[in-house]
Image (cartoon, coloured by chain):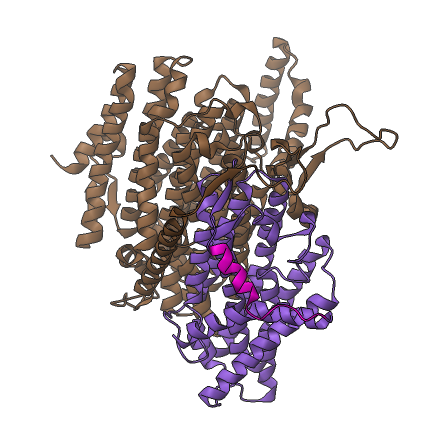
Amino acid sequence: MISIVLMVITALFFPGVIVKSKAKFSGRKGPGIFQPWFDIARLLRKGNVFSNASSYVFQISSSVYLAAVFTALLFIPFENLGPLISFTGDFVLFAYLMALGRFIIVASALDVSSGFEGMGANREVLYGLLVEPAFFILIGSLAMFTGHASFASIFQGLHYTSYFSAVIGVLAAFTFSQITLVESSRLPVDDPLTHLELTMVHEVMVLDHSGFDLGIIKVANNLKFAIYGMLSANCLIPHELDFWVRIVIYFVLQVGLAVAIGFIESFRARNKMAMNPQYILSISAIATILIFVVIIINNNL
Amino acid sequence: MKLVNIFEAITVLTVLVFFVPLRWKQTLCLALSLAISAITGYWAFQNLVNHSTVVEKLSLPFWFHSSLLEIDPLSSFFLLVISFGTLTSILYSSGYLKPYERSKTRQEFALHYFWLIWLQIAMTLVVILHEGLPFLVAWEIMSISSFMLVIFEAEKKEILHTGIYYLIQMHVALFFVLAAFTLVEAKTGISGFDGLAIYFKEYASIPMFLLFFAGFGIKAGFIPLHSWLPHAHPAAPSHVSGLMSGTMIKMGIYGILRVVSYLQFDLLEIGTIILLVSLISSVFGVFFAIFQHDLKKMLAFHSIENIGIIGIGIGTGLIGKAINNPTICLLGFTGAILHVVNHSLFKSLLFYCAGSVYSQCHSRDINELGGLIKKMPSTAVFFLFASVAICGLPPLNGFISEFLIYKGFFSGLGSDIYVSLLFLGGITGLTLTGGLAVFCFTKAFGVVFLGAARTSKVDHAQEVSPSMLLPKFLIGILIATIGLLSFLFLPTIAGIAAIYLPSGMELPQNPFGSVLTNLSISLGLFVVVLTVVFILRAWQQKRQIIAQGPTWGCGYSAGDFRHQYTSTTFADNLNRMTSAFSGVETHYVPIPKEDVFPKAKRHYETHQYDQLEKLLILKPSKFLLNIMEKFVVLRSGKIQHYILYGLGFILLAAFLTIVNVI
């Protein structure tokens, strides 16, 4: 349960820290840390405008998306402190719930008969298709390293006996954070602040969502940050430390990740659209390196 | 009178279809099918619940009266799949065939229903006959009956052509299986599957397995033996495509599962072969599906994908058996067998939905459809449901079988370097398949059912009749039940998979531990969370203003339905990445430089050509045809020449006898 509380807290400050750090880097004062959530709260109090072309698929999409992401969150542990449910292969369910969320949002984008939203939908499924193998190769190599096959037992078994094996943690955390960028549609894959619909990915799909529906999509997106942030942190925090020390390290890491995202978004431009597939495939390549590191460490080679 | 005699009596009664009035034909067909299903269902129940192998003897002379019907767990499982598949197909057929009543004669309908019921009988016999010759005869009846079903609209030339193409490929498959059985009988003296137990003990397993794999693989549709599927499925009427794709191609899987159960040596090699072929089938099956614009052709490619997933399960299980790991073995085979039933459900549902769309819009071209969700709401729900299931997404049944196979893969990581790498490859392939399936079905569902209509073909579409919705509803219930309550079904299926366990190992009391209940709890949790969100949303929306408006055009006010994404454009970004091997050809004349403001209507078309079919089927057959054409000179049409040929042959024979060659 502690992991769920931690992730909810992270989701509360994470988007705000990104916005704040971007403001600081560009020399502005910036809004308060919780401003993104005030915006969401305002959306949640509003009604909806539906496109004439849309059907009930559009209306249920945001709810299914939130439910899928929230259920996926329940499987994520905080190190050895178990999640709500844990069983062998739970990460398969996790990944497929995320895919279900993607499926329904893409369907809703196609439901409004807009060429722009079709564009976003098309990109989203392609990027999703390319990033999923990276997640599975990564989890597969961690499962190989620890000899376990569930989130909780994998992260419990991640003991680094030497500096050499700590490479695995660093590589895994790096890969998870790269997956975060793709899944949450941040730079360099997608620029959430762009004003040109032609170059958007995730934002353009939800152009026609409004009010409450848009609000819960944003909630789900923030939860996604927290989920992948937790996965990255789990690869890095040593088990031997005191509980409270680990909590502190966890929050430092989360703030660090958010500032890093803000830093990247301040100093780097979005990839050319045609470069994105290559960029995303390189994440799988990094994950493949991890496999060989694991094989070498386990003395199988 | 024994049950088997009633079964035989029903096979004779099928001729009645020719003598009843038109409106009774479908009912009679359904009744006969129900009777057969009841009998086979009883046998399967006897076997699965009471654990007794049912052995019956056929008595009618034309049914090889010495041959035995043996119903073991594997047969029982397939009997249930066949019965359910045929019943829904016949239920659906009455509504689907109604428009043809004007153009088709009574005899043609009678012939169609006659072969429909015989397809069920043939498939039933295939899974319960173990001896060589009777099995092959049943196999042949299955091919012929499905051929007759495919060519229902034989007056269209391309459909007849496709039917013959299919028939030829089925006979190539038959040749492989026949050769394999003959070899086994020659070496062991026992005909049929029982001889395999001795054969595999004493002779090399791999060549014999490959012979069977080629034969059964053509039926099942493994790449590169798949080329008949994308032709035959679109040509057949939809209830037949649903039955063929959902159930009949599984007979190939049955054959492979049966042969694999006798293997004793070289398990690792054979497992690897199956796994690699299946991975290629699943990834490329769905990959090619993305570039199809014909709805039913796309579904046919998805059958190849799903056959691949089943094969991945079989390969994993076999490798598990090879390395003496009962967990992997059980997970792989259970996943494969469960995926057989899962695929038979959602694939037939998808074909019935595609058939409903075709019957209303008279088009299978995805690019001509759109916005059907408002005209055919129930069909759209079923299509969405089946799409989610076929993509393997929770909480529906496709997820359960893929989950088991994943779990098998993950259990094998770290044991042995060769197996680990193979399994990591398997995981990547399966993930890629899942991602591509989501790509393909968001496209199919989005373009066909969502958005706005693209042509006037959609204008007159209406929801189909309840008789066409009923079978979809029945399938839908099963899909949801298997998905949410897998723990009810899986112990039985694990019991079937137990025949593959390494020798000397028994099926554990609780083979999956608490995983299944946890899985069901998690999926239930998802449903609960979803319901809570829905209730919250409904409660919040009650007090708000809900407005309708035009789609946000991003500042562009002249947008219309033609700006929507189509099947072609949706596949475009993937095509650009993979143009080296996607086989997509674009038919488009680029705008000339001086033509700054093009006036005339322009056409842009893409078409996917199956490179493997070209390489394996079209090129060799063209080569043969070229050689054969050389002999056309001999056909002079003059009787004198033909007598001369005869004389020449006799002289040659005489000469060869003198020199003792023959």
Res. B519 visible in picture:
yes
In the image, A124 versus B304, the foreground residue is A124
- Using the image as rendered, state which of residue A257 and residue B415 is in the foreground: A257
Chain displayed in purple: A
| Residue that sits furthest to the right in the current view | B594
Q: Nearer the viewer, residue B375 or B569?
A: B375
Relative depth, front residue between B519 and A216: A216
Q: Which residues are magenta?
A: A28-44
How far across and how far down the image is residue B175, in percent? 47, 38
Note whether residue B285 is visible: no
Q: Residue at x 49, y 16 (%)?
A: B155
x 36%, y 35%: residue: B137
Position of B634 with respect to B155 (left or right) is right
Specify the quadrant of the image occupied by residue B550. top right
Residue B184: give x, y in percent of width and height: 40, 49
Picture coordinates of residue A297, whole percent (x, y):
57, 82
Q: Chain B colour? A: brown
Residue B654 higher or lower than A39, as above or below = above
Q: Position of residue B428 (x, y in %)?
A: 54, 61
